[in-house]
């Protein structure tokens, strides 16, 4: 429930700082960068949140692999 309230507040009062925009532009392929910049702030913020969450999950799973 708290997560949904958090989502709602972020949708009403979107915020994305310059480091998040830089991170997104660095990680997006060239063709997607202009599309990202055309999105609303709430869409950009959501896109960065989802992408960073997926990257964290990928890194966590890679760290869980037992070698040898």
Image: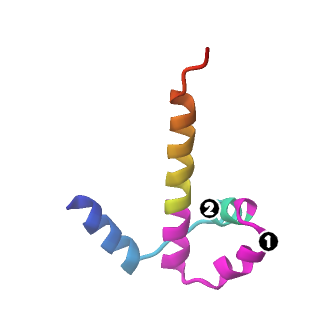
Q: What x and y, as percent, mark residue 28? A: 71, 65
Query: Is disc 1 placed on a helix, strand or loop?
Result: helix
Q: CA distance from mark 2 to mark 1?
A: 17 Å
Instruction: Determine contact: label 2, label 1, CB under 8 Å.
Output: no
Report the side of 32 relative to 20 (left or right): right
Residue at 54%, 21% in the rendered image: 66
The quarter of the picture where the N terminus appears is: bottom left
Name the residue at the top extreme.
Answer: 68
Name the residue at the front extreme.
Answer: 68
Q: Which residue is mark 2?
A: 20
Q: Which of the two marks, 2 or 1, is nearer to us in this view?
A: 1
Name the residue at the left extreme.
Answer: 1
Vertical placement of residue 21 versus 37, above or below:
above
Q: Residues within 10 Å of mark 1 (few under 14, many from 20)?
A: few
Magenta stretch: includes residue 48: yes
Q: What x and y, as percent, mark residue 34? A: 73, 80
Highlighted magenta segment, given as a residue range: 26-49
Report the side of 20 relative to 56 (left or right): right
Name the residue at the right extreme.
Answer: 30
Q: Residues within 10 Å of mark 2 (few under 14, many from 20)?
A: some
Query: Is disc 2 placed on a helix, strand or loop?
Result: helix
Magenta stretch: includes residue 32: yes
Q: Which residue is mark 1?
A: 30
Badge 2 or badge 1: first in the primary sequence: 2
Q: Main secondary structure of the magenta part?
A: helix
């Amino acid at each position: 429930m708290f997560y949904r309230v958090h989502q709602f507040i972020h949708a009403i009062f979107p915020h994305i700082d310059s480091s998040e925009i830089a991170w997104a532009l660095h990680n997006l392929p060239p063709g997607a960068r202009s599309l990202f910049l055309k999105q609303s702030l709430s869409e950009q913020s959501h896109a960065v949140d989802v992408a960073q969450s997926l990257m964290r999950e990928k890194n966590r799973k890679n760290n869980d692999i037992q070698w040898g």
